[in-house]
Amino acid sequence: MLTVGKTISKEGAVIKQMLKDRILTDKERKNLSILEVIRKNGPISRTDISKITELNIVTVSNYVSHYIKKGLVVEGELDESTGGRKPVLVELNPKAGYIVGVGLNMLSMVAVLVDLEINVIAEIKRERLPENSEAVIHKMVDLAVEIIEKSEVDKEKIVGVGVGVPGIIDEKGRTIRWPQSLGEKDISVCLSIKDTFEKRLNIPTFVENDANAAVLGEKWLGLDRDVRHMLYMFSGVGTGVLINGEIYRGATGAAGELGISSIQAPKEDIAVMSSALGRWEMDLGMTARAKELIQQGSTSTLKDYVQGDASKITFREVVKGCKEKDALALRVVEERATMLGRKVAFLINLLNPEIVVIGGGIEDCGAPLLDAIKNTVKEWAVEEASSQVKIIPSAFGENAVALGVVGIVAREVFAQA
């Protein structure tokens, strides 16, 4: 068993306390704004930081001096001058701390260890267990242990761990409920994810819903800082919602669960409703649909990928078939993308986002999926909203959730600087 330090440090305890959904104080907002600009644009002068953040130069200089004393920021080379004294450039000290992120995806588990500039120091990917259970959580902890050992960084400098998992998480990260598709009973895991990680690693841990983590990761690590309203469609079963630059979790943390279901309703009614408001499978039902068409006599190279046994077809074979222009795979992808496009159109009409990111694994289907979604949105969404929105694939693919929770922890570290 790996133990990182004998106790969680005082600074770590502060971060742990702040790893929750709350309104930032004025000081925290300034910390986050200044350090985010330094991280994305450094080396940079204090004057340019002032221009970008719209904070006065005296405030910026005072904050930057404090960061330098803490070792979070370092001074570097001199900038070119248009006259007079050359300004000193500052940049983030990436080795001031490290963050671990562990994300659970449709087919895999991903762990990353990054420095404060979000440079990936180590990365591990493993196939996930095929069920939602406590065993999955323990495997994720094992992955965190493995990546810390692999990275060989100073373990005392690991300031936090982020964990991204699907489902509805209580506000303390203690329990999780996985909503099931097609009227099946939801699965509740009473194991405390947060406590399990902290007991094993002795590092402050924050647990976040996968779609929420992914939407913040795309915004904070990839997209322009001016983007304020965004949706992340996580394999069509969950939605990360960014409003005014912040994750929207709802009153009890259940916002973004895309679809309704009832264990009392007849299976036939739920199946009919699944094309509209019903809950879907993680792959939008592509695998099941491909198997159904093959069983009905349709020919496809997907069977060749599994030595003729159609029952062994998985989403990986559907993606491969799509990329190799298999007619059945393309039909399935376009059919399910059209269904998803209607849900996206509904959400665009409701929330009027600037960007909709398609991720969670389904984006691997490429242009056939994206084009069908875009065409459907154009048909079903109101013109005022659909003409302005950008629909793009996830920039981080399988790493989106792991990097997203890393971003959440980093934001809290910066806010408390």
Image: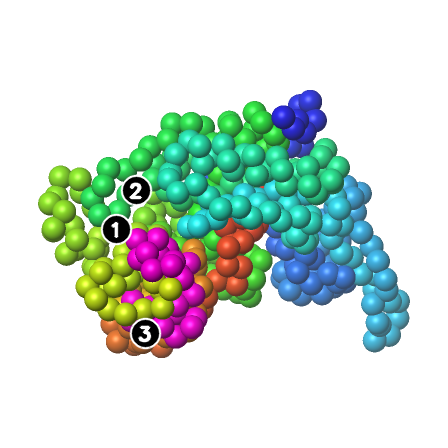
Q: Are marks 2 and 1 in contact (CB under 8 Å)?
A: yes
* Chain part drawn in magenta: 305-332
User: Dot 1: what SS?
Assistant: loop
What residue is shown with label 1? 279
Q: Nearer the viewer, mark 3 or mark 1?
A: 3
Binning the other alpha carbons within 10 Å of mark 3 as few (below 14), some (14 to 19) or many (20 upward) gives some
What residue is shown with label 2? 179
What residue is shown with label 3? 327
Is 327 on the left-hand or right-hand side of 121?
left
Query: Looking at numbered disc 1 in the image, what kind of residue is underneath it?
Result: Arg
User: Dot 2: what SS?
Assistant: loop
Q: In the drawing, what numbered circle is on residue 227? A: none
Q: Are marks 3 and 1 in contact (CB under 8 Å)?
A: no
Q: Residue furthest right?
A: 85
Asked if the magenta segment contains residue 321, the reply would be: yes
Closer to the camera in the image, 284 or 385: 284
* Residue 293 location (% of width, % of height): 23, 64
Earlier sequence position, callout 3 versus callout 1: 1
**Distance from label 3 to label 1 (Cα)?**
27 Å
Closer to the camera in the image, 144 or 374: 144
Closer to the camera in the image, 251 or 181: 181
**Distance from label 2 to label 1 (Cα)?**
9 Å
Height in image: 185 above or below 349?
above
